[in-house]
Image: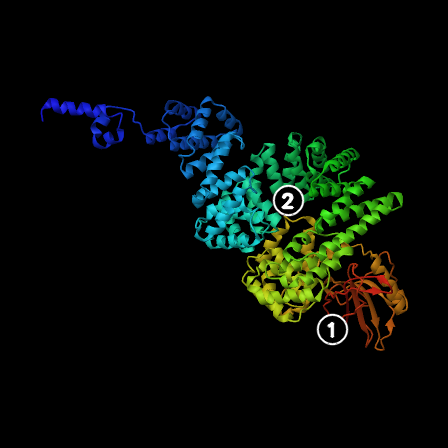
């Protein structure tokens, strides 16, 4: 070919560069290097965007290329802007600056025009990012993006569907039709889902719309996929826990697996993460001593580094209730210095945490109360109730604060239309010191009753009874309006129970009810309703029903037999953490089911492989419950009485409140005593001498009213006060309320000149390691002892005496009236 022709060919190629740069790059790399043309291609522009280090450079590229930007490039511009935004300290302020930038409107318009041509991933990604630059949720762009996503919904893959659900959740569209459609898609395609991360996001966002059956399907799928995730994916585990919190589902196996992920990655947990998980665990009543220990360690290290009120309050709320004495003092001292800078929300969070901590720091309480007082108008009804509860619990006294609180509650009550808010206001009003009811408030209560469930009725009744008590105390009278209202409450409660036809729904109403009104007015009707629905008791709710019986102390043989039967039939489906709740009513009510040995044996068998992982407190209470039922499983007792376990228990006791701490120590002592007396072959030593002596020194020995009545009756029956002895201590410091001695002809023997007063009875020790003079008995004489407990609210049985040949004083449980006077619930008589 001639040279001129060859040159002409090159010129034609150069002329065509503007039309087809991709072909030139592929066929003539030499000219690409020689002639530095700017190609018309989105790929290099995307690379340039990715290299931008600030928003101005991004907007400069948008301005220079706005005529040719593709949908993919628009989406990438949003993505890079969001990555830069996340690196900013003051993200909200910077987001507004980005939104107000002149070129942001250019990007906005380009996005609006290219919605239809965007890929599914780009579309949802832009929808996710746009509101983070302060674009309002009702903005036309956001509405258009949502509409287009809704149109494509069926074709979204699981990752895009999850992100779209998160966008809707950000807009609080939990109950929207489009969220319902997403729930339907998840339900239909659940079998094919293999990505637990995306599924966990979807589970949280659709949790408000799904049925109990759908919840169970999601939980089963989560369990199947759990082993597919990396053990370091703490965010996926956190979302699963959040889902369980959202559906109020204490699914122990799943919670334990998530908890294990947290423990394996505890060094990666930050303040927000720990705070969130502790809140959910508390709500679900899931207790993990190991997680609390590592959380406490992580949070304690943060104390010196946090000096901003917002972050420090979050630390105070998370760490305070589980901190040791030194950490608590450090927290309170630091908070005191910044107390005047607290917002209304922060002050509320602090006072709730102080209530949990059982704080008695009067200076800090006054400071926080002052902030609350200044901001009372900013709080809603439920928050006002929390404030009232906390201030009363903390023994805060200020007439000015409580007067303002009362005025605010009354004014809020007048305009309240939401049922739960109205009940909260009524409860708060009734808690205020020196309060009294008026006709308007009582009329408001009466108008609410037809709308209330059992929990609402219980709250209303508690408030009315408090007003009745206060009015009687201060004015010596009870109004007819109050009595009529109490009668109507009784009627509504019984009617509600009679209409119950579903055990799960009934339990939702029962699980939080408590108080005198419920026990005195509708407890019998509640038991009737439970008996009517007892065939619905199964492995999923048997622990709940058992807990209710324990809480109410109501002996229903039919219900307890049903509980035992369900456990025997379905023990493999019951989690070991539920065993304590299941056996507790049998312990409290001293009831043996027909298949006693099989029932207790299966419960212990279910626990066997989990003895090393169960919570130390739970093991102590399990051991004592079994011992009270005269069942002493050696494996359980050996697991409790060893050095390693007791060291764990000591560590746990450090973070418990004073009341629970004392209760656990006392229960451990009782278990130690029972095992030493009943199972000497286990060779478990008695190590509570010092503890018992300390308790004995604190004891005032004052008899309560029921004990004083019983003492008088026993003295009358036996021939005088010299024939009965009160407050006697047995071996291992078991306190026996009353003792008498009968000779071989069963005639009472006098104690001589040991006079006992009703105020503070004298003490006598027998057969103990404490040397007491005159403890021997005449030949043929027998010593009889009784141990009484607290008053019983259900006067249905006559006095029963339980005779025991053992030196161990077991607790019997009996309800009785004696000579028409309600006496005691626990009576055990032993002789030697």
Neighbor class of circle 2 (other Cα within 10 Å; few <14, some 14-19, many 20+) is many
- Which of the 4 image quadrants contains residue 346? top right
Q: Which of 304 and 566 is in front in this view?
A: 566
Residue lying furthest left:
2
Residue 752 visible in the current orientation: no
Gap between marks 1 and 2 measured at Cα:
46 Å
Q: Name the residue under label 2.
A: 321
Quadrant containing the C terminus is bottom right
Neighbor class of circle 1 (other Cα within 10 Å; few <14, some 14-19, many 20+) is few
Mark 2 lies on a secondary structure that is helix
The tag earlier along the polypeptide, 1 or 2, is: 2
Q: Name the residue under label 1.
A: 805
- Which of the 4 image quadrants contains residue 116? top left
User: Residue at horizontal 20%, vertical 28%?
Assistant: 30
Q: Nearer the viewer, residue 793 or 143?
A: 143
Residue 551 visible in the current orientation: yes
Determine whether, in the image, residue 523 is placed left or right of residue 594.
right
Quadrant containing the N terminus is top left
Residue 681 locus on image (x, y percent): 62, 70
- Which of the 4 image quadrants contains residue 687? bottom right
* Number of the label disc, if any, that sits on residue 543: none
Residue lying furthest front:
151
Image height of 616 relative to 156, above or below: below
User: Residue at horizontal 67%, vertical 41%?
Assistant: 352
């Amino acid at each position: 070919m001639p040279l001129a022709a060859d040159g002409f060919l090159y010129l034609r190629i150069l002329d065509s560069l503007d039309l087809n740069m991709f072909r030139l790059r592929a066929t003539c790399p030499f000219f690409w290097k020689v002639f530095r043309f700017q190609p018309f291609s989105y790929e290099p522009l995307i690379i340039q965007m990715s290299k931008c280090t600030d928003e101005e450079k991004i907007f400069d590229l948008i301005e220079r290329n706005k005529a040719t930007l593709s949908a993919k490039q628009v989406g990438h511009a949003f993505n890079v802007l969001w990555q830069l935004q996340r690196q900013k300290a003051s993200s909200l302020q910077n987001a507004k600056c980005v939104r107000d930038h002149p070129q942001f409107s250019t990007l906005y318009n380009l996005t609006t025009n290219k919605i239809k041509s965007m890929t599914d991933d780009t579309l949802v990604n832009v929808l996710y990012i746009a509101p983070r630059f302060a674009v309002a949720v009702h903005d036309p762009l956001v509405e258009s993006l949502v509409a287009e996503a809704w149109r494509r919904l069926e074709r979204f893959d699981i990752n895009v569907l999850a992100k779209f659900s998160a966008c809707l959740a950000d807009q609080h569209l939990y109950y929207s039709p489009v969220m319902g459609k997403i729930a339907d898609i998840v339900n239909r395609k659940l079998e094919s889902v293999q990505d637990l991360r995306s599924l966990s996001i979807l589970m949280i966002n659709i949790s408000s719309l799904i049925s109990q059956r759908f919840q169970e399907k999601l939980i089963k799928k989560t369990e199947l996929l759990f082993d597919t995730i990396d053990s370091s994916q703490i965010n996926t585990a956190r979302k699963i826990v959040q889902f369980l919190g959202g559906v109020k589902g204490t699914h122990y196996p799943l919670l334990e697996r998530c908890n294990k992920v947290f423990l394996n990655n505890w060094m990666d947990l930050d303040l927000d993460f720990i705070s969130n998980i502790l809140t959910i665990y508390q709500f679900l009543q899931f207790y993990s001593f190991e997680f609390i220990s590592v959380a406490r360690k992580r949070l304690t290290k943060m104390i010196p580094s946090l000096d901003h009120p917002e972050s420090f309050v979050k630390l105070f709320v998370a760490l305070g209730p589980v901190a040791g004495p030194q950490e608590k003092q450090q927290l309170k001292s630091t908070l005191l210095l910044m107390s005047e800078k607290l917002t209304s929300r922060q002050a509320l969070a602090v006072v709730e945490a102080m209530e949990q901590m059982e704080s008695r720091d009067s200076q800090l309480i006054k400071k926080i109360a002052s902030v609350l007082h200044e901001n009372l108008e900013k709080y809603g009804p439920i928050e006002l109730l929390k404030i009232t509860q906390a201030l009363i619990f903390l023994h805060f006294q200020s007439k000015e604060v409580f007067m303002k609180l009362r005025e605010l509650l009354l004014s809020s009550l007048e305009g309240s239309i939401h049922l739960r808010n109205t009940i909260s206001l009524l409860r708060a009003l009734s808690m205020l010191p020196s309060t009294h009811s008026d006709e308007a408030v009582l009329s408001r209560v009466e108008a609410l009753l037809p709308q209330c469930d059992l929990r609402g009725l219980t709250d209303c009744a508690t408030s009315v009874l408090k007003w009745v008590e206060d009015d009687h105390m201060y004015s010596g009278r009870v109004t007819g309006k109050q009595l009529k209202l109490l009668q109507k409450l009784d009627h509504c409660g019984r009617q509600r129970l009679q209409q119950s036809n579903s055990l799960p729904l009934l339990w939702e109403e029962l699980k939080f009810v408590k108080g005198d009104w419920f026990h005195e007015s509708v407890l019998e009707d509640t038991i009737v309703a439970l008996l009517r629905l007892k065939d619905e008791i199964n492995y999923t709710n048997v622990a709940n029903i058992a807990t209710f019986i324990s809480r109410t102390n109501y002996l229903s043989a039919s219900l307890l037999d049903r509980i035992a039967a369900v456990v025997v039939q379905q023990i493999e489906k019951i989690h070991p953490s539920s065993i304590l709740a299941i056996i507790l009513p049998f312990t409290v009510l001293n009831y043996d089911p027909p298949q006693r040995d099989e029932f207790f044996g299966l419960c212990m068998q279910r626990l066997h492989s989990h003895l090393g992982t169960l919570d130390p407190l739970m093991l102590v209470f399990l051991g004592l419950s079994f011992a009270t039922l005269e069942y002493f499983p050696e494996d359980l007792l050996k697991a409790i009485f060893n050095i390693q376990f007791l060291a764990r228990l000591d560590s746990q006791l450090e973070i418990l409140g004073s009341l629970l701490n004392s209760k656990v120590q006392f229960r451990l002592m009782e278990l130690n005593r029972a095992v030493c007396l009943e199972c000497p072959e286990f060779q478990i030593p008695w190590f509570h001498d010092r503890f018992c002596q300390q308790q004995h020194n604190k004891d005032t020995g004052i008899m309560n009213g029921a004990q004083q009545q019983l003492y008088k009756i026993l003295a009358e029956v036996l021939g005088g006060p010299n024939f009965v002895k009160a407050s006697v201590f047995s071996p291992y410091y078991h306190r026996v309320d009353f003792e008498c001695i009968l000779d071989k002809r069963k005639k009472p023997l006098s104690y001589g000149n040991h006079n006992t007063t009703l105020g503070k009875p004298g003490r006598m020790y027998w057969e103990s390691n404490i040397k007491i003079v005159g403890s021997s008995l005449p030949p043929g004489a027998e010593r009889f002892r009784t141990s009484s407990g607290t008053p019983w609210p259900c006067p249905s049985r006559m006095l029963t005496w339980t005779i025991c040949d053992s030196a161990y004083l077991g607790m019997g449980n009996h309800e009785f009236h004696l000579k028409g006077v309600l006496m005691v619930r626990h009576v055990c008589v032993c002789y030697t």
